[in-house]
């Protein structure tokens, strides 16, 4: 499962604890929102890196948004790479930013794949009470 | 935008946050704690709500937002004489605590915020409100 493979931290568990009868798909909705927003942010970061003169202020602002939304779903690897990127911005190290962006894109792609598989599996398993009843 | 937990309207909370994912998560935390939640996308929207005469028991501010930051908004809101409302700074930024506390925030909580951290804060606001009513 995704949380055990180091891609998500305890924050993801917090989201699962918020899920109840009134919000049965809460976690999937939050993740869907993240997966809708994050490609746009990554694309904006890539475009901004390609511009001259370099705008490290804008880059920092964009990656700050990505870090914030990623940490809200517990995406620990994405969050950590965003911190690395921010450090490169602070040092005005464009090459460092480029390398970090490539890592962020890879982490994002992997995370997206794992989350989509995770929710697909949950849908196949069905609600917990059904799984318990089937053993009786 | 106002969100209300069914049957519970004891605490009026204003959440000032530009990132949509963070808004969804934090507003859900607040609703679970039976708060009546109003959302603002940046510091200026928060200031405008106070200028319109809206009242809140607690305001949670992100730090870095477009148009107006959280600390900037706190300065303006406190300058309006809003000294009773609990102002909480929330940020993943390492230097955010000083930025918030130096301008009159009551509290700083690092992001991502946990329910275990928010629960006691809301309870304290509830207790204060009950005491003020007596």
Image: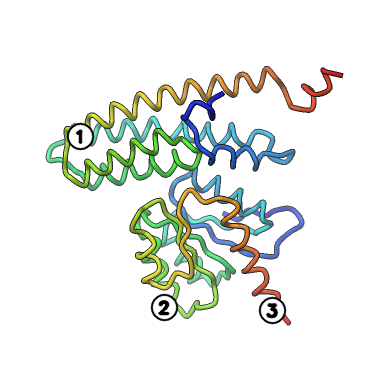
* Callout 2 secondary element: helix
CA distance for labels 2 and 3: 25 Å
Residue B79: mark in rendering: 2
Q: Are marks 1 and 3 in contact (CB under 8 Å)?
A: no
Q: Quadrant of the C terminus of chain B?
A: bottom right
| Chain at numbered mark 1 | A
How far across and how far down the image is residue B20, in percent?
A: 48, 44
Counting other residues with Cα less than 10 Å from the Cα at mark 1, is it few (<14), some (14-19), or many (20 or more)? Answer: some
Instruction: Say which residue appears at 51% left-offset and 35% top-offset.
Output: A33
Q: Is residue B25 left or right of residue A40?
A: right
Q: Is residue A3 left or right of residue A86?
A: right
CA distance for labels 1 and 3: 55 Å
Is the image coloured rainbow, by chain, by secondary structure, or in one colour? rainbow
How far across and how far down the image is residue A98, in percent?
A: 22, 31
* Callout 3 secondary element: helix
Pointer 3: what residue? Answer: B131
How far across and how far down the image is residue A101, in percent?
A: 28, 31
Q: Are marks 1 and 2 in contact (CB under 8 Å)?
A: no
CA distance for labels 1 and 2: 43 Å
Instruction: Say which residue appears at 15% left-offset and 40% top-offset.
Output: A54
| Chain at numbered mark 3 | B
Q: Nearer the viewer, mark 1 or mark 2?
A: 1
Spot the residue most to the left.
A53
Pointer 1: what residue? Answer: A96
Residue B26: mark in rendering: none
Instruction: Say which residue appears at 45% left-offset and 41% top-offset.
Output: A71
């Amino acid at each position: 499962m995704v949380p055990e493979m180091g891609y998500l931290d305890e924050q993801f568990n917090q989201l699962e604890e918020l899920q109840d009868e009134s919000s049965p798909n809460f976690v999937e909705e939050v993740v869907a929102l993240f997966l809708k927003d994050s490609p746009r942010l990554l694309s904006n970061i890539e475009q901004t890196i390609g511009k001259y003169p370099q705008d490290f202020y804008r880059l920092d602002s964009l990656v700050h948004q990505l870090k914030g939304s990623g940490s809200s779903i517990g995406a620990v690897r994405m969050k950590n790479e965003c911190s690395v990127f921010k450090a490169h911005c602070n040092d005005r190290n464009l090459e460092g930013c480029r390398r970090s962006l490539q890592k962020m894109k890879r982490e994002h792609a992997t995370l997206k794949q794992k989350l989509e598989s995770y929710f697909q599996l949950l849908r196949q398993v069905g609600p917990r009470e059904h799984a318990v009843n089937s053993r009786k | 935008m106002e969100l209300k937990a069914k049957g519970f309207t004891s605490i009026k909370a204003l959440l000032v946050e530009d990132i949509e994912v963070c808004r969804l998560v934090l507003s859900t935390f607040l609703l679970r704690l039976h708060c009546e939640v109003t959302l603002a996308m940046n510091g200026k929207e928060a200031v405008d709500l106070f200028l319109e005469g809206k009242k809140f028991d607690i305001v949670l501010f992100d730090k870095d937002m477009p148009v107006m930051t959280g600390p900037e908004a706190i300065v303006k809101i406190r300058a309006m004489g809003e000294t009773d409302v609990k102002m909480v700074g929330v940020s993943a930024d390492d230097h955010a605590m000083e930025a918030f506390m130096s301008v009159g925030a009551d509290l700083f909580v690092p992001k991502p915020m946990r329910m275990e951290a928010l629960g006691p804060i809301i309870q304290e606001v509830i207790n204060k409100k009950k005491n003020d009513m007596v």
